[in-house]
Image (cartoon, coloured by chain):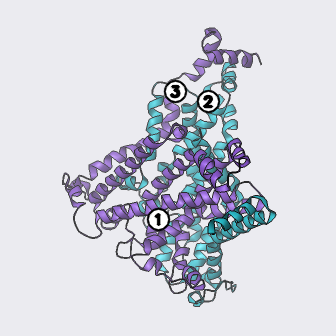
Chain colours: A purple, B cyan
C-alpha cells in the first residue's frame, strides 16, 4: 500500500524525489528490452526484412530455382523486360492492379460508410445485420470464391437471374474480358465491406455528439449534418480505411486465382497475380522478383503519399 | 422533385416510427443479401444431380445427402482439418508470446534502440506478402523447410497488429500499478506474467481470434510452401488448399463441390459466430487506434 502512494507523486512530478523514483526507473530502464523484443524482431528479420532485400538481389539474375548456383547474372535485364510486349504485359497488369484497387478504395469506402450510417445506434436487429455483413470477411476466400463462380455463371447463376427478373440486360460476368474485373470487384466488396463498415461504426461510436445536436437544432437537414459535420469528424477513420483497402487490394491474390484465374485473356491478371504466375508457374523467378520489386515500390509510394496527406490525428497507426 | 421527395423520406426516417421500421427493413434486407450466397451453396449441396444448372435457379434444398457423402470420401478431410487446426493454434500461441513480450518492451520498458526497433516493426507493414513469397520460398527451400508444418507456423508467429495492440493496452494501464509491483521486488517477467497479462487480456483475446482466423483463411503461402499430395495421408496441407485441389480435380461435380465448400466453411463460420463480439471489437479497436 505504501508503495503505491509513494510511487505516484514520484512519476507525476518526474525527478523531484530521485531517491523514491529510482526503483521504478530501474524496473523500466533496462537493456533486457532487446531480449523482450527479440522473438518478434527475429521472425520479422528472417522472413520479412532480409527477404525484402533478397528480392532485389534475385531480380538481378536469371534465377535457376532448382540449382541457384547455375543462375546467370542479368543486371537490370529483368527490368528492361518489363516493357516487352509479351502477353500478359507488365503495364497491363499494373493497370489492372490500379483499376481494382481504385474501385475497391472508392466503392468500398463509400459503401461501408453508407452501411455504417445505416447500422449505427444499436438494436438487436441492426446488430444481427452487422454480424451478417461481417460474416463473408470471416470466411475463407477460396471457399467463397467458388460460391461466386456459380453466382456469376451466365447459364444458371443468381446474378443473371436477378438481372433477368428485373428486366435488365444480363452479363457474361467472369467469362467476358470486359466484365470479369467488375465481377471480381463485386465479389471483393462483398468479402471486405463488413470489416470496413465495422471500422466506420467504431469511428461513429466515439464521435462527440454536441456538434451534430447543435446542427440539428439549427435546422440542418440530415444530409447537411452528415456532409458538414459527421464526414469531417470521421476524416481520420476514412484515411485509415482508404489506406488499409489500398494496401490489401494491391496485394489481393486469392480471388484472382480461384475466381477468374487471371483471365479471360489476362483481363484480371494483376501485378500480384503476375508475380505468382511468372515465379511459380512459369518458373522465371528472377523476372517474378523484378515484378515483386515494382509491386513493393507501388505499395511504398501509396504508403508515403498517405502519410504526407494524413493529419496528426491518425499518427497512432502510421 | 426527387430532392423534395427524398427530403420527405428522410424527415420521416429521422422522426417517424415508420422511418425506423424502414431502416430496420433495409438493414435486414442487406444483411440477408450478404448471407444468401452461403444459403444457396447449402441448397446446391443438397440438390439432385443436374438440378444445379436449372434456370431459374433452385432456391429450396431437396435434402439429398449423397453429394456430401461423395465429397467427404474423395479427400482426406480429417487429416486436412487436423493440419489447419494444428497450424492455426500453434501460430496463435507463438503470436501471443511474441506480441506480449514485444508489446511489453515497446509500451513499458525504456532501452536504447527502442525507437529504432519500433520503426523497424512498423516498416514490416509496408512489405507486402506477395513480394516476400519469392525470397521466402528460396529460403525455405535452402533450409529444407518446404512441405513442413514449421514453414506454415513460424513466419506468421509475429504480428505487427498484435504487438501494437498489446502496446496500446500497456500504455493505457496506470503506470503506478506495474511500478508498485516492481517496488515490491517482483522481477520484470513476474510483473509481466502476474499483473501484465491479466490487464492486457482483452488484447490477447482479440489477437488470438484474429490470428487464428487469418491462419485458417490463408492460401497463397501454404499453396506455395507445400506441394499437393491429396491422396497421401501424410500431407501437411491445410484444408483450404485441399479444397482448392479438390475443386480443380472435381470441377464439374458442382453439388459435390458445394458440399465440400459447406463442410469446410461451417467450422470457421461457427468459430466466428461464437466469438463475433471479439472480432467486432478487434475491428472497432482498429478505429479506436486511429483516433489515438
Mark linked to residue A178: none
How many residues crowd around disc 3 within 10 Å: few (fewer than 14), some, or many (20 or more)?
Answer: some
Residue B9 image-quadrant placement: bottom right
Cα–Cα gap, marks 3 and 2: 11 Å
x, y percent for residue B276: 68, 56
Pointer 2 residue: B189
Pointer 1 residue: A254
Residue B290 image-quadrant placement: top right
x, y percent for residue A245: 50, 55
Residue at figure coordinates x 46%, y 62% from the top left:
A103
Q: Secondary structure at mark 2?
A: helix
Q: Earlier in the sequence, mark 3 or mark 1?
A: 3
Foreground of the two, A116 or A10:
A116
Given contact means CB atoms under 8 Å apart, are the residues at marks 1 and 2 in contact? no
Foreground of the two, A236 or B87:
A236
Is residue A316 positioned above or below A299 on the image? above
Subunit under mark 1: A
Given contact means CB atoms under 8 Å apart, are the residues at marks 3 and 2 in contact? no
Which residue is the extreme one toward the right? B17
Q: How many marks?
A: 3
The mark closer to the camera, 3 or 1, is 1
Same-subunit check for callouts 3 and 1: yes
Horizontal arrangement in the rendering, residue B9 relative to residue B50 (left or right): right
Pointer 3 residue: A32
Is residue B107 positioned above or below A223 on the image? above
Foreground of the two, A177 or B98:
A177
x, y percent for residue B16: 79, 62
Q: Quadrant of the C terminus of chain B?
A: top right
Same-subunit check for callouts 3 and 2: no
How many residues crowd around disc 2 within 10 Å: few (fewer than 14), some, or many (20 or more)?
Answer: few
Is residue B76 positioned above or below B236 on the image? below
Amino acid at each position: 500500500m505504501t508503495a503505491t502512494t509513494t510511487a505516484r507523486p514520484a512519476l507525476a512530478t518526474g525527478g523531484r524525489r530521485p531517491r523514491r523514483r529510482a526503483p521504478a526507473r530501474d524496473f523500466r530502464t533496462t537493456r533486457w528490452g532487446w531480449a523482450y523484443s527479440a522473438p518478434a524482431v527475429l521472425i520479422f528479420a528472417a522472413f520479412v526484412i532480409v527477404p525484402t532485400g533478397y528480392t532485389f538481389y534475385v531480380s538481378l539474375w536469371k534465377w535457376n530455382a532448382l540449382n541457384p548456383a547455375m543462375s546467370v547474372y542479368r543486371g537490370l535485364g529483368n527490368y528492361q523486360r518489363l516493357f516487352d510486349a509479351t502477353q500478359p504485359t507488365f503495364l497491363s497488369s499494373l493497370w489492372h492492379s490500379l483499376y481494382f484497387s481504385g474501385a475497391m478504395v472508392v466503392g468500398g469506402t463509400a459503401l461501408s460508410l453508407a452501411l455504417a450510417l445505416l447500422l449505427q445506434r444499436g438494436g438487436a436487429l441492426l446488430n444481427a445485420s452487422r454480424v451478417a455483413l461481417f460474416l463473408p470477411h470471416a470466411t475463407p476466400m477460396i471457399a467463397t470464391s467458388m460460391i461466386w463462380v456459380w453466382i456469376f455463371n451466365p447459364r444458371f447463376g443468381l446474378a443473371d437471374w436477378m438481372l433477368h427478373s428485373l428486366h435488365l440486360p444480363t452479363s457474361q460476368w467472369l467469362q467476358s474480358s470486359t466484365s470479369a474485373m467488375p465481377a471480381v470487384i463485386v465479389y471483393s466488396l462483398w468479402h471486405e465491406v463488413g470489416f470496413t463498415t465495422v471500422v466506420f461504426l467504431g469511428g461513429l461510436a466515439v464521435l462527440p455528439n454536441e456538434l451534430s445536436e447543435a446542427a440539428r437544432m439549427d435546422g440542418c437537414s440530415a444530409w447537411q449534418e452528415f456532409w458538414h459535420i459527421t464526414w469531417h469528424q470521421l476524416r481520420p477513420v476514412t484515411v485509415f480505411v482508404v489506406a488499409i483497402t489500398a494496401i490489401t487490394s494491391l496485394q489481393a491474390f486469392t480471388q484472382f486465382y480461384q475466381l477468374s484465374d487471371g483471365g479471360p485473356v489476362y483481363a484480371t491478371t494483376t501485378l500480384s497475380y503476375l508475380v505468382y504466375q511468372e515465379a511459380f508457374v512459369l518458373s522465371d523467378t528472377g523476372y517474378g522478383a523484378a515484378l515483386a520489386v515494382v509491386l513493393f515500390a507501388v505499395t511504398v509510394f501509396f504508403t508515403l503519399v498517405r502519410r504526407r496527406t494524413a493529419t496528426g490525428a491518425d499518427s497512432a497507426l502510421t | 422533385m426527387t430532392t423534395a421527395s427524398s427530403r420527405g423520406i428522410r424527415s420521416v426516417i429521422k422522426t417517424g416510427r415508420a422511418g425506423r421500421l424502414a431502416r430496420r427493413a433495409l438493414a435486414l434486407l442487406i444483411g440477408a443479401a450478404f448471407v444468401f450466397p452461403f444459403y444457396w451453396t447449402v441448397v446446391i449441396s443438397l440438390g439432385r444431380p443436374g438440378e444445379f444448372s436449372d434456370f431459374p435457379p433452385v432456391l429450396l434444398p431437396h435434402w439429398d445427402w449423397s453429394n456430401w457423402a461423395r465429397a467427404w470420401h474423395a479427400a482426406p478431410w480429417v487429416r486436412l482439418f487436423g493440419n489447419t487446426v494444428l497450424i492455426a493454434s500453434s501460430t496463435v500461441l507463438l503470436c501471443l508470446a511474441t506480441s506480449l513480450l514485444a508489446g511489453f518492451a515497446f509500451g513499458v520498458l525504456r532501452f536504447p534502440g527502442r525507437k529504432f526497433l519500433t520503426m523497424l516493426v512498423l516498416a514490416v507493414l509496408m512489405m507486402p506478402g506477395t513480394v516476400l513469397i519469392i525470397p521466402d520460398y528460396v529460403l525455405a527451400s535452402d533450409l529444407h523447410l518446404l512441405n513442413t508444418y514449421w514453414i506454415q507456423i513460424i513466419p506468421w508467429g509475429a504480428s505487427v497488429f498484435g504487438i501494437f495492440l498489446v502496446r496500446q493496452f500497456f500504455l493505457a494501464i496506470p503506470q503506478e500499478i506495474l511500478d508498485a509491483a516492481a517496488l515490491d521486488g517482483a522481477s520484470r517477467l513476474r510483473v509481466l506474467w502476474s499483473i501484465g497479462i491479466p490487464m492486457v487480456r482483452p488484447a490477447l483475446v482479440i489477437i488470438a481470434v484474429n490470428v487464428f482466423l487469418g491462419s485458417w483463411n490463408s492460401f497463397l503461402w501454404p499453396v506455395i510452401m507445400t506441394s499437393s499430395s491429396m491422396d497421401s495421408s501424410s500431407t501437411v496441407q491445410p484444408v483450404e488448399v485441399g479444397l482448392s485441389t479438390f475443386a480443380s480435380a472435381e470441377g464439374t461435380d458442382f453439388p459435390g463441390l458445394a458440399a465440400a465448400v459447406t463442410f469446410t466453411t461451417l467450422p470457421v463460420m461457427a468459430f466466428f459466430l461464437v466469438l463475433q463480439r471479439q472480432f467486432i471489437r478487434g475491428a472497432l479497436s482498429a478505429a479506436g487506434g486511429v483516433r489515438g
